[in-house]
Amino acid sequence: MAYTPPPSKFSRLARIGRLTSKVGGSYLGQKVKGVFQKEEDRARDTRQMQVEGAQRVAKAMGQLKGAAMKVGQQMAQVVDGMELPPEVGVALRQLNDKAEPVPFAVIREEIERQLDGPISQHFASIDPAPLGTASLAQAHAATLHDGQQVVVKVLHEGIEGSVDTDLAALRRILISGRILNRPKAEIDDIFDEVRDRLMEELDYYQEAANLEFFADAFQDDPDIVVPRSHPALSTERVLTMDRLSGVPLDEFLKTASPQAKHRAAVSLARSFFRMTYELLALHADPHEGNYLFMPDGQVGILDFGCVKRFDEYWMADYARVAEAAIQGDREAVSAAVLKMGVLTGPSPAAEALLWSFTQTIGKPFAGPYKLGAIPDPVAEKMRTLGPKFLRHPEIQTPRDVLYLHRSLGGLYSILCRLEAEADWGAMLSPWYRMAIDRAEGRP
């Protein structure tokens, strides 16, 4: 199939305008219809309207290509943390992060322009067939003149110019159609956070710095491998990094021993806890494609474009919620969520819902626990709790929680596939205690 570039800015705006009218019109139509409906029928039809609106958004954003696909994908993961109807997230998740390959002639031209010289000057060879093509960039395997294997990642031409347009458009659509029926301040925070992370993903100098930070942090860890960047072969739009060995999760699961699976699971969990509570910098794009697994269970972590950083005092408050939830201290949980702004005012019903939420998410940390059960009791319970959050506008999602819980959810999914069993609470407690002690000035 021939390569088709993303639509022009004018074409994008025209399509977005038509979509906004359709989704907004559906909401107004339901608003009028709802006046004459029973409460139960009105709630059912409003939910259906949200789902249909999300399906329209997913289809349109996919047709726009480029940044629109990444924006939609990010929002799909974010709304999972907002406890909207699960069908909304399902619809938006149709926007996976795959795209049709860009011809190598286009890639070659960009590399040579960015590195100021012919490819042969910088690489002994480069594979014209891409390792992968995503909504923002394309990656190719290459070999340096000294024989080292590397990966060269190249941003798509003009991608930066469509991020703000597509993000603003998606915001208008989701609000006009009441697909995100949340307080304005919360929605503003959500979109600001998504934009910040997206703009960082478009800056390969920043990603190179992230690689060096995490490679230094894990250089003495026998269980985790992080590739290093090659600064002389990197620019704002081209990133060259070490190529790691290993296989994707699906292939690893076919051949790995129980011991290797256990090592991989524990390594992933421990690296997540360390990034979150000690390093205050989290690899925030934890889908399966960003990990490579060695036969013995060692794990390579890829793609550090999306990294979430935390303030140490905010993290101490979050750690206090985790500690109180695991210890069953309901009063301490309520005090901590009030301080963090998750709960914006006293409300017994909202406090009870948050307590149920923390007890559900904390269940795997209550003692030795095996993940991967079908059906998953934690996921089943979360599905019943989700719609209840819509009844409580006093419960809001702080922007720092969005990518933290996105990452936690991604990690949980991978650990379930590994069918991991461990005392997760005992593994976690030293890390959250470290965060609390550091904020309180204790060594």
Image (tube, rainbow, N blue to C red):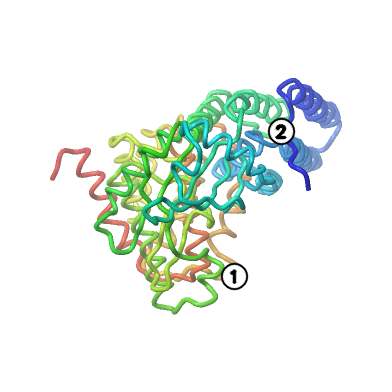
Q: Is residue 292 left or right of residue 180?
A: left
Residue 236 versus residue 424: which sits nearer the camera?
Answer: 236
Residue 364 figure quarter: bottom left
Q: How many marks?
A: 2
Quadrant occupied by the C terminus: top left
Report the residue at 46% width, 50% height from top.
Answer: 124
Q: CA distance from mark 1 to mark 2?
A: 41 Å
Dot 2 amino acid type? Pro
Residue that mark 2 sits on: 6
The crowd level at tag 2 (other Cα within 10 Å; few <14, some 14-19, many 20+) is some
Q: Give the label on residue 374, or none.
A: 1
Q: Is residue 332 left or right of residue 190?
A: left
Q: Is residue 98 above or below residue 64?
A: below
Dot 1 amino acid type? Ile
Mark 1 or mark 2, whichever is nearer to me: 2
Q: Residue 372 at what x, y percent from top left? A: 52, 69
